């Protein structure tokens, strides 16, 4: 999207700030509240992909249910000219992966400070029966005051009293799968090759 484009007559695109598997993220300006915002826009090539649309909508729904100082706030969700977008709190900082790449080894006190905030956010999500399912350094933002914000609830699942575990489905980032999930994935691949 071009700088200067307006979404919903309210959010002005300033510049591109990141990309993920299904979406692009832009720094925007909320013209009504006069504040910076992050605008996550579903990539155009996913507009007819029902799974991607469902995941994008799930992210918006999950995040709007969670008000916590360590979870990125969602301000608005809308669609315009076949573009699905989520307007979120803008975090002036970086993700934890880049932070560690730049800072190097993190001192134990700093690691505890970071993990305390991450666990506080995850605890609230779990209390609200929402499981993130993709906690990784790239989904943990850290601002210039060392405040942590968890983002990207795209594959989160909301648990209900009748929830069941889907044993044939693996979601998440391969590099951050638990050993149990990786083992299951390896066995499934082997069984598939034998059949």
Image: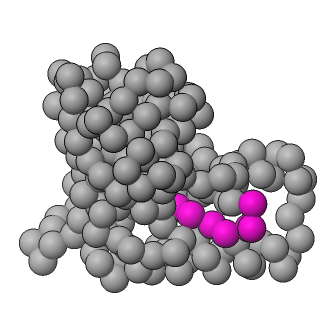
* 71 or 180, nearer to the observer: 71
User: At which x and y percent is residue 149?
Assistant: 56, 63
* 137 or 27, nearer to the observer: 27
Taking 132 as reference, is 92 left or right?
right
- Please, is residue 58 above or below residue 117 in the view? above
* 167 or 121, nearer to the observer: 121
Task: Identify the residue shown where x is 50% and y is 34%.
Answer: 26
Q: Is residue 134 visible?
A: no
Q: Is residue 10 visible?
A: yes
Magenta range: 144-153
Corner quadrant of residue 131: bottom left
- Classified by dominant secondary structure, the portion drawn in magenta counts as loop
Check the picture and name the quadrant holding the N terminus. top left
Q: Which colour scheme is used?
A: one colour
Task: Identify the residue shown where x is 31% and y is 17%.
Answer: 45
* 93 or 6, nearer to the observer: 6
User: At which x and y percent is residue 90?
Assistant: 54, 52
Q: Is residue 46 magenta?
A: no
Check the picture and name the quadrant holding the C terminus. top left
């Amino acid at each position: 999207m071009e700088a200067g484009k307006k979404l919903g007559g309210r959010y002005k695109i300033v510049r591109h700030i990141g990309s993920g598997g299904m979406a692009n993220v832009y720094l925007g300006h909320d013209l009504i509240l006069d504040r910076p915002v992050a605008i996550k826009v579903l990539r155009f090539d996913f507009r007819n992909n029902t799974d991607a649309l469902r995941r994008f909508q799930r992210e918006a729904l999950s995040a709007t249910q969670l008000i916590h100082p360590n979870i990125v706030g969602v301000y608005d969700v809308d669609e315009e000219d076949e573009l699905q977008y989520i307007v979120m709190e803008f975090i002036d900082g970086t993700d934890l992966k880049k932070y560690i790449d730049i800072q190097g080894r993190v001192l134990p006190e700093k690691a505890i400070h970071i993990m305390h905030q991450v666990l506080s956010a995850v605890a609230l999500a779990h209390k609200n029966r929402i499981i993130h399912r993709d906690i990784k350094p790239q989904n943990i933002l850290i601002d210039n005051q060392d405040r942590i914000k968890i983002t990207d609830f795209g594959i989160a699942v909301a648990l209900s009293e009748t929830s069941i575990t889907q044993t044939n489905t693996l979601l998440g980032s391969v590099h951050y799968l638990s050993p149990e999930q990786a083992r299951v994935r390896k066995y499934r691949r082997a069984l598939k090759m034998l059949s």
